[in-house]
Image (cartoon, rainbow, N blue to C red):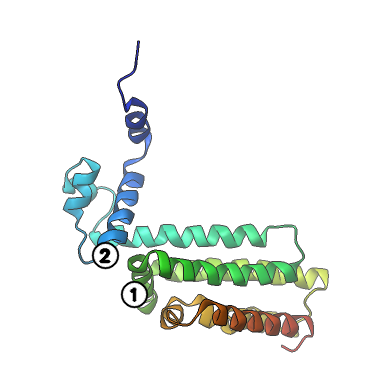
Amino acid sequence: MKRPRGGSARLAEAATPPDSRLLAIAADHLKRFGPRQITVVDIADAAGMTHANVYRYFTSKAALIDAVAGQWLKSLEALIAGIADAPDPADDKLERLIHAWSQMHRDLLIENRHLFDVYCTATETSRPLVRKHRARMRQLIERVIDEGIATGKFEPRDRERAIGFVSDAAYRFINPLNVRLDVDVPKDILDLRLAAVVRVVQRTLSHGIL
């Protein structure tokens, strides 16, 4: 007996948790229309439910948009965690970490400007999702710095100052507000500037300058 066409797709959709489907639809609408133009009603219609049902999972449109931004931040954290947990030497991992962190921001700015602007607004207003993200990113930097100290790759005079220095030095390339200001700067120029910053960070940590 043949299954009706699209049966497997419908089964897959049915197996997807409602909040995940809503997030996927909201992410698509946000990318296409921007935060001001999307509505809970439109997202509910696309999901085949009432808008009242959406509020069972997200308390407001703002909460739904924050959740979309939170998904992207988690993908960034997962990428950086993968680098931090890799078997490479700590100095190599730190270089890869900074480059990947910067590249993820640039890619988002180019590929999904509306989501990037949401991220910038959340950063400007210090929303909880951004504060939590900063804490998680600091923990990942700490992990690499501590590994470098343990293996003799890094010899800082002050661990806390060294950890803070990494974020401060790379600030232009990892803070969304600064990344947005550099939108018209050619990529090759930004790459050269970032490479110079990474060299300074490596030298500072390995020679005990801080």
Q: Position of residue 159 (x, y in %)?
A: 70, 79
Q: Position of residue 11 (x, y in %)?
A: 35, 29
Residue 87 figure quarter = bottom right
**Residue found at x 82% / y 68%:** 151
Q: Are marks 1 and 2 in contact (CB under 8 Å)?
A: no
Q: Is residue 73 above or below residue 185?
A: above
Q: Is residue 196 above or below residue 17?
A: below
Measure how far apart labels 1 and 2 are at the Cα level.
13 Å
**Residue found at x 16% / y 52%:** 41
**Residue found at x 69% / y 85%:** 200
Residue 34, numbered circle: 2
Of marks 1 and 2, the one in the foreground? 2
Q: Secondary structure at mark 2?
A: loop
User: What amino acid is at disc 2?
Assistant: Gly
The furthest residue to the top:
1
Determine crowd level at label 1: few under 14, some 14-19, many 20+ residues with C-alpha closer than 10 A.
Answer: some
Residue 107, numbered circle: none
**Res 20 seen here:** yes
Q: Position of residue 145 (x, y in %)?
A: 70, 72
Image check: 145 left or right of 124? right
Residue 121, numbered circle: 1
Quarter of the rendering occupied by the N terminus: top left
Q: Is residue 175 above or below residue 36?
A: below
User: What amino acid is at disc 1?
Assistant: Thr
**Residue found at x 79% / y 85%:** 207
Q: Earlier in the sequence, mark 1 or mark 2?
A: 2
Image check: 62 left or right of 51? right
Q: Secondary structure at mark 1?
A: helix
Asked whether 28 or 127 is in front, the reply is: 28
